[in-house]
Image (tube, grey):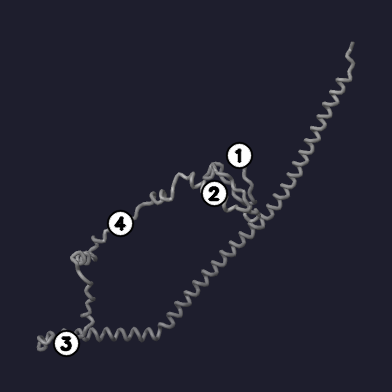
Amino acid sequence: AMTTPMMLDGAEVPAPFGRWENEESNDALPYADVLPEGWRAGVDQLVQEEMRRMKKRPKDYLAEMVPAREIDWRGCPLLRKEFERVEKGGGRMPPPDATRYELAPPPKSKRGDEGAWESALRDARAHLEHQTTRVQNLELAVKFAPDAWRTHNASLEAAISAYETELAAVRAEIEHINTERSLQQTAAAREIGKLEQEWYATAAKCVALDGVVMDLELKAEAIKAGETNAKPSGR
């Protein structure tokens, strides 16, 4: 018959045919058991023996993993030209094109061309509009950015406070569980110690009774032998 290992109240009973079917049951009370001297060396030895019995090695677990997919960046149209430049022995990357930020008049050869001056004037107006937009953005930032950042910081502080509250609740729950386990296991250790003392006392009584029974059996055999020798021969 299958026996159920000793557990505390509320502990789940393992299935008879589960993952740990052939393993030894764990009935340790870590909050109450006293570790003997040199226990770590024994534990390390058990771990090494278990690792020697394992069919798999650490490298076997890596072999079962799906290999990472290799990406061919040469097929990317955005990088094709750059790869071609590097393959041709191209030097440093060309600097960014900053002509769109320049405000230059028409070249000397076109100073008399009305169309060139109109194009330069359009560029100047575009630059002026761009600078005007930048100034407006800076003015809006000066007016509204402080309050916006304060609101953002307040939301971050609220999120931090919520996470800290949740963390404190989880830590309190862990502490409650550990305290409850400690109390349960300490009570179980006292009960186990009491039962162990009763077992030793009962075993001692059994041994004493066994000795008394053996002594009485020897006396009974001696009495029977004496009565046999005391009987007349019958002649």
100 or 49: nearer the viewer: 49
Which residue sits at x=78%, y=40%?
205
Q: Quick one: label 1 or label 4, which is nearer the N terminus?
A: 1
Where the N terminus falls, by quadrant? top right
Helix, strand or loop for disc 4: loop
Q: Quickly name the residue at label 3.
A: 105
**Residue 77 left/right relative to 136:** left
Residue 100 image offset from top left, x and y in percent = 22, 80
User: Disc 2 residue type?
Assistant: Gln
Note whether 162 is above or below 128 in the view shown. above
**Residue 133 left/right relative to 120:** right
Instruction: Calculate the distance from the C-alpha at mark 3 to the C-alpha at mark 1.
Output: 98 Å
Q: Residues within 10 Å of mark 4 (few under 14, many from 20)?
A: few
Q: Quick one: label 4 or label 2, which is nearer the N terminus?
A: 2
Residue 51 image offset from top left, x and y in percent = 49, 47
214 or 187: nearer the viewer: 214
Q: Could you tell me how many numbered marks the image carries?
A: 4
Q: Quickly name the residue at label 2.
A: 45
Q: Quick one: label 3 or label 1, which is nearer the N terminus?
A: 1
Q: Quickly name the residue at label 1.
A: 2
Instruction: Calculate the distance from the C-alpha at mark 1 to the C-alpha at mark 4.
Output: 53 Å
User: Disc 1 residue type?
Assistant: Met
Helix, strand or loop for disc 3: loop
Q: Mark 4 or 2, which is nearer the eye?
A: 2
Helix, strand or loop for disc 1: loop
Q: Quickly name the residue at label 4.
A: 70
**What is the quadrant of residue 16 in the picture?**
top right
Q: Quick one: label 2 or label 3, which is nearer the N terminus?
A: 2
